[in-house]
Image (cartoon, grey):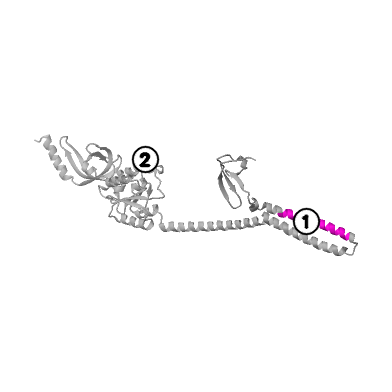
Amino acid sequence: MMTVNSLNIKIKSLLEATFMHIQVEGEIASVTYHQASGHIYFSIKDDKSSIKCVMFRSNAQRLKFRLEKGERIIVEGSVGVYTPRGEYQFYAVHIEPFGRGALALAYEQLKEKLKQKGYFDQANKKTIPKTIRKLALVTAKESAALYDMIKIIEKRWPLIEVIIIDTLVQGEQAPREIAEALQYADNLNIDLIIVGRGGGSTEDLWAFNEEIVADTIFTLKTPIVSAVGHEIDMPISDFVADMRAPTPSAAIEMILPDKQEVLYAINEIEERYSQTIHQILYHKSIQIEQNRENLGRFSVKRRLQELSQTFNNIQNEYKRIIQYKLLEFSSKPPKIKDGIKQQLSFILNQKYQQKSILLQRFQTNNPRDGIKDGWAKVSQNGKIVSLSAIKINETFFLEDVNTKIEANCSKRMTF
C-alpha cells in the first residue's frame, strides 16, 4: 500500500521524465503577472480542455511581448507536479506567438500602447532648430555609424561643436544605457541630439524598441532625431522622436547645411546687392548732375547775365536804329534833327539808368557783398540780433564774409 505523498512523487517522476522539452499550442485563457515575485501565472486551452502554466521570473524577464487573454501562443517547457496539492502544471521556459515572432508581437503591442499615450502625436513634437551650434551624438564611439556622421559633419558644416556620448546600442544592457545617455545629453544645454546606430537584424536593433528608451525620448527637453539602421528599419524610437532619419548619415544631411551651398548663396546675395548699389549710385549721380544743371540754369547770377545780354542786344538794336534815323533825317532841317537827337539821347539815358539799376541790384544780391568792410553781422544763439539786445557779460558773435569772432559784452553805451 502507498501513501498519498509517495503516489504524488511517483506521478511527478513519471510525468517529468515523460514530458520534457515539449511544445504546446493553445489560446491564453487567463493570465496574471505577479508583481512581487516577477512570475507569470497563466492557462492555455483548446476547444476541449485547458492546462495551468507558470513562467518563473528568470525566464519571464527575457519575454519580449506581453501575454494577453485570447492570444494564441506556442509554449515550450515541461510538465511538473506540485506534490503538496497533487496538481500538475506546465512550466514554461519560452513562449512564441502562434504564426509570428515574439519580437514582432512585442513591437506591435508597445507601438499601440505608446500611440494611445500620445507619444506619436505631432502636437508633442519639438521643432528641429534651423541653426545648430552644439550637437550631441548618442551612439557607440567605435561604431561605423559614428565615423560616417563625423565624416559628413566635417564635409558639410565643420563649424559645429560635436559632443560624442558613448553607449551600448545592442544587448540586454543597451536600453538602460541609451536612456541614461539621453538624459545626460539633455542636461548639456545643446541644440539637438541624434541617437542611433548602423544597420543590423531585428534583434540587433531591438534596444530602440524598448519602452524605457521611448519614455526617455518623450520626456527630453532637447529636440531629438532618431537615426537607427537603414531605410526599411522603423524602430519605436523613430515614432517617438521629433524627427526620423533613415540612416545616421542621412540625419546629418537633414539637419546641417552644406557649406558649399551656403557659400554659393552668399556669393549670389553679394553680387545681387553689389548690382543694386551700383544702380542706385548711378541713378543718384544722374540726379545730382540734373540738379546741378537746374541750379545753374535758374540761378540769380545766370538770370542777371541773361537780362544783361538782353539789354545789350536791345542797346545795340537801338544804336542801329538811331544811326539809321540819323542818316534818314540828316537832310532835314537842323531843328528837327536836334529834336530827334534830344529825344534819342533821353531814351538812351533812361536805358543806361535801367542798366545801372540792374547792375546795382545784382551787386546787392551778391552774398559776398552782403557785409561791407568795417561792418559785421551780430548773432546770438544762432539768430541775428541788434547790439541793443545784448546785455552785459553775454556772449555774441561778429561775422563778416570771411571771419567769425566770438565776443563778450563787458560794457555797453547807448547813443
Residue matched to label 2: 116
Amino acid type indicated by mark 1: Lys
- Magenta residues, as a range? 336-359
Residue furthest out toward the right = 333
Left or right: 88 as drawn, with respect to 155: left
Residue 32 among magenta residues: no
Which circle marks residue 166 in the picture? none
Residue matched to label 1: 351
Percent across and percent down for residue 23 are 23, 46
Label 2 SS: helix
Residue lying at 58% horizontally and 51% vertically, measured from the top left: 403
User: Magenta segment, principal secondary structure?
Assistant: helix
Percent across and percent down for residue 85 are 17, 34
Residue lying at 25% horizontally and 47% vertically, measured from the top left: 173
- Binning the other alpha carbons within 10 Å of mark 1 as few (below 14), some (14 to 19) or many (20 upward) gives some
Residue 351 among magenta residues: yes
Q: Is residue 4 above or below residue 130?
A: above
